[in-house]
Amino acid sequence: MSRIEQRFAELREQNRAALIPYVTAGDPEPGATVPLMHALVEAGADLIELGVPFSDPMADGPVIQKACERALRFGTGLRDVLAMVAEFRKTDTTTPVVLMGYLNPVERMGYETFAQTAKAAGLDGLLTVDLPPEESEDVVGLLEQAGIDPIFLIAPTTSEARIDHVARAARGFVYYVSLKGVTGSQTLDTSALAARLEGLRRHTGLPLGVGFGIRDAETAGRVAQVADAVVVGSAIVRLAEEHDGDADGFARAAAAVVSEMRHAMDAARSPGAAATV
Amino acid sequence: MNKIDWAAFPDARGHFGPYGGRFVSETLMGALDELQAVYEQYMQDPDFLAELDHDLKQFVGRPNPLYHAERMSRELGGAQVYLKREDLNHTGAHKVNNTIGQALLAKRLGKKRIIAETGAGQHGVATATVAARLGLECVVYMGEEDTRRQTQNVYRMRLLGAEVVAVKSGTRTLKDALNEAMRDWVTNVDDTFYIIGTVAGPHPYPAMVRDFQAVIGREAREQHLAMTGRLPDTLVACVGGGSNAIGLFHAFLGDESVAMIGVEAGGDGVETGRHSAPLCAGQPGVLHGNRTYLMEDENGQIIGTHSVSAGLDYPGVGPEHAWLKDIGRVNYVSVTDDQALAGFHRMTRTEGIIPALETSHAIAHVLDLAPQMRPDQSIIINLSGRGDKDLNTVAEREGITL
């Protein structure tokens, strides 16, 4: 059983939803990332999504664009990010780590080299936002041999026919993009979300994570009532901008947000909680 | 080479060999499927094709001439030089061939809002023009750096009713404008049609833009045959994203005797690293929805490009060019900023035609190539755009304030 499967199995038993914070690796500086990952786990994260900085983050809003720019000041590349994963694994062997980014850095490194290096580092999953299943055959085979789950997105615009296609290619969990737009966008309609997730469960038995537009603990709590995982990115990454140059301050603020969301999510799943969706 | 069925490319999923494809976020996959279906349907629809032909004739001014540049040919003392006069199109460049076609598709899809990216501003102007004509809302994304280089085109777009958004992220040039247009599209995909200006982006854009631009080569082939009784020996066009080059080349791909040369922007010289020549000095990667040659560093980050011409200042290139390079059908070379400026002046003074700085790259290559050929041979240059928009840039380089 992979670390991701193991983690979702444990959470299901406890009737909890997974909390998945996203941080951009190397933001605000390379040395900050591994301590930050540990701090997020300490504060209640179940799985870490680590962003690979890219020069042209087309699917991201301004908050994560700026995070990429801050990380790229130090030239943080994919090899550096995998080294951070390896460092994290030295003291945490149970929290799954998923890389999220764009295909070109992986393509440049070479799929085979990436799969081997990532396996050695203890990586669990890879989500490349600009790689739909149709183009992913080569890389998915190599990832599976290395025991790394390819994570795919489903969007509000994904047709019924495509949902099956995506669900067949996906491993680990399915990431549902909760709204049309880039990361960090404004609104999230949780009642429409509930209906959509119900529909998705007819196509896949994999856990369903929801991301894009989850800005605060209250929203995280509402999403946790219907989803198996809540992904929070811009709401955390924006704190790096506020604490630019102060890595410890950023880590403390990020941990506080994660902790607040953790409580809201667990409370929303507790037997006495009223359904708010 | 003669075994290639050129009409079979791209394949059903948009691949030209290993290049092309559809590398976008899931949110856009449905819109691209819809676009592909509509495009394939209407390219077989006699009413649509008749409307397109009518607009190209009555609004754009096609067919434009294939002009024999006799004085320049004589001075160079070699091949006869012919110019395909895309600069004479309405809006002053080849870009309008494509925006006319895509806008007609947008209308049939019932979209109320059009977005576009632009570098030099020619595609932005051509998009704003067709949007004005069809009464559609239009937003054009342009790198902040380019809005400074091309103030006249910015004003032109605003006069036409378009909103011009100066993009301040990344290198603030064409690639960042494209990123921002993609972000807009992913947010407003239900009511918005994205008119991409070149033969790049996710499938079906490279094939669709090529098909709308292929009118250039169809006309040029017929005109050259009518004027000389034979096919040209060599075609030369500048390559940024590569839409004017594909437009000229496409109808000739099956003519084995016709050589083709794509001219990239060498900037300060390819050896300096300050250039925009991914086919000459880059390597394959994935950006903006397709696999193609890119300028990137060892970590796969896209690197800053340089060219005197904003329209060529782009780190990628259309995937069909990447494939044509690999199979050896087209030869890709580069010329520097200084060489392009020399080409600009030579054309202006010899033939009374002020070319765009993009086009000047193709001219510069012909200044070297024509003298090596015989007077009974011929070259067609795609004179892809006129140079009015570049007068400030040229004057500034030469220390003149207008």
Image (cartoon, rainbow, N blue to C red):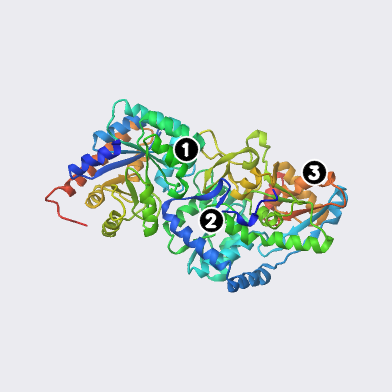
**Which label sits in the foreground, 2 or 1?**
2
**Host chain of mark 3:** B
**Which percent across, then down, holds residue A195?**
27, 59
Question: Which amino acid type is marked by label 2?
Answer: Ala
Tally of numbered discs: 3
Q: Are marks 2 and 3 on the same chain?
A: yes
- Pointer 1 indicates a residue of which chain? A
Measure the C-alpha gap from mark 2 to mark 1. Answer: 25 Å
In this image, B68 relative to B388: left or right? right
Label 2 neighbourhood size at 10 Å, few (<14), some (14-19), many (20+)? few
Question: Is residue B159 shown to the viewer in this render?
Answer: no
Q: Residues within 10 Å of mark 1 (few under 14, many from 20)?
A: many
Callouts 2 and 3 close, C-beta under 8 Å = no
The kind of residue tagged 1 is Val
From the viewer's perspective, tell me whether residue A218 is left or right of residue B187.
left
Which residue: 64% across, 70% down? B55
Q: Which mark is residue B12?
A: 2
Return the x and y of residue B14 as percentages of the image width and height: 54, 53
Residue A106, numbered circle: 1
Distance from disc 2 to disc 3, alpha carbons, whole Å, reads 40 Å
> Residue A231 lies in what quarter of the image?
top left
Q: Same chain, marks 2 and 1?
A: no
The type of residue carrying mark 3 is Asp
* Vertical position of residue B226 compared to residue A257: above or below: below
- At a point 52% along the width and 69% down the height, the residue shown is B107
Can residue A195 be seen here? The reply is: yes
Q: Earlier in the sequence, mark 2 or mark 3?
A: 2
Badge 2 element: loop
